[in-house]
Each structure stands twice: as structure tokens, then as C-alpha cells.
Image (spheres, rainbow, N blue to C red):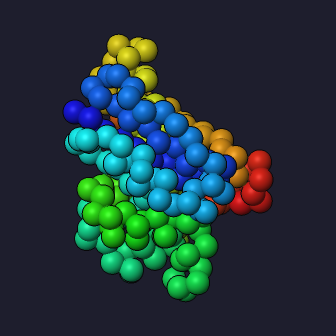
Amino acid sequence: MKVLGIDPGTQSWDFFGLEEDKIFLDISIPSKELIKKPQKAINIIKSFKTIDLIVAPSGFGLPIKEIHELTENDISLILMKFEKEDRNKILGLGQILRLFKTESVKAVIIPGVKHLPTVPEYRKINKIDMGTSDKLCTAVVGIKDQMEHFKSRPEETNFIMVEIGYSFTAILAIENGQIIDGIGGSNIMGFRACG
């Protein structure tokens, strides 16, 4: 299987592709550059004839949804911005999602931590950011890493994940191989953000 994931970071947008266990793509484009020329994202994707699965930049996430099904309301939820002018300011994410839809990119939006059934409902009350979709992916990599390092099954992995980014830091709790809680990056101080 050939898969491609896109991480829309504060400093850069990262494109990472795997075919089985082999890396076929690992590039970063400065965020400022991609905002000016969003077509670059499409060009990267279309430079490969076949990709079985593309995980689109998903922000705060949604239950799994294909890009062609996205509505403006979905984009508002992904960005957590509900005023039209605000939706277009988030590092170009809304603009790029609309471009993906227009260009018929076959990609999916993935959940954020708050969408997971493994997080108890009482922990979700009055919370918006429990971890964006990219933080969820980092936790999955952590689970895989522990499985390989300790030769264990997924349900034997238990750890606290701290991801320190350029502007945002997030903390997730993994118990018995499942994400059970999280504090998203917009709630915590980062190198360039006050939380």
C-alpha cells in the first residue's frame, strides 16, 4: 500500500509518503511559501501516478470523511473558525482544502483526539482542543514504536506523549494501546505561542 500524509505545521507543511515500509517522499515546504503558492501541494501529490491513501491536512479533525464530501461547515469545524474571513486566515488550510476538493484530490480527513470513542465522554466536556489530527498520528507512531522496541502487543503500550512543536505543544495519554486523554496545543504554551 502506498500512503501519503500531510502535516500543516506552523513553520512548514510536511509531506511524507510510505510504500509498505519504504519512504518514497519526505519533504517540507515553508508555510509562508505554501500560502503564496498553494498549487505546490497539488503538484507534489500529482507527481505520483498512484497513491492508495492520502491523509489530507485535517486540523481539529472530523470523523473520517473524504475531501469531495466536505462542506463549508466541515471546513469551519476543521479550523474551529466560524467567521468566513477567519476561515481563510489559518495558514491557508481552508484554502488548500478547498483547492483539494476543486482538483478532485482523493484524500480523507481524519479525526482529532476528541472524536475518538476511546476518550471517555466526561473528559470531552467543555474541551475543544484535546489534540489535533496530526497529534493523533504522532501517538499512533509512538504506539508502533513501543510495540517494536519492547516486542509487545498494542494493548501493552502505556505512555504519555509530549509533542513540542514550533508554536504548539500537546500532551496525550495512551493506556493499553488507546488514546484516552489529551491536552491540545492551543491550551499549552509553546516556543512561540502563549497557549
- Residue 97, x across and y down, in percent: 42, 66
- Residue 89 is left or right of residue 95, and the answer is right
- Residue 152, x across and y down, in percent: 33, 18
Residue nearer the viewer, 4 or 118: 4
* Quadrant of the snapshot with the C terminus: bottom right
Q: Is residue 175 above or below residue 126?
A: above
Residue nearer the viewer, 161 or 190: 190
Which residue is painted at 65% across and 44% down in the image? Answer: 165
Question: Which quadrant of the structure image shows residue 193?
Answer: bottom right
- Residue 1, x across and y down, in percent: 22, 33
Residue nearer the viewer, 25 or 187: 25
Which residue is painted at 41% across and 55% down in the image? Answer: 42
Residue nearer the viewer, 54 or 142: 54
Which residue is painted at 49% across and 53% down in the image? Answer: 40
Say if residue 44 shows up in the picture. yes
Which residue is painted at 37% across and 74% down in the image? Answer: 74
Count of marks placed on residues: 0
- Residue 109, x across and y down, in percent: 34, 58
- Residue 140 is left or right of residue 10, and the answer is left
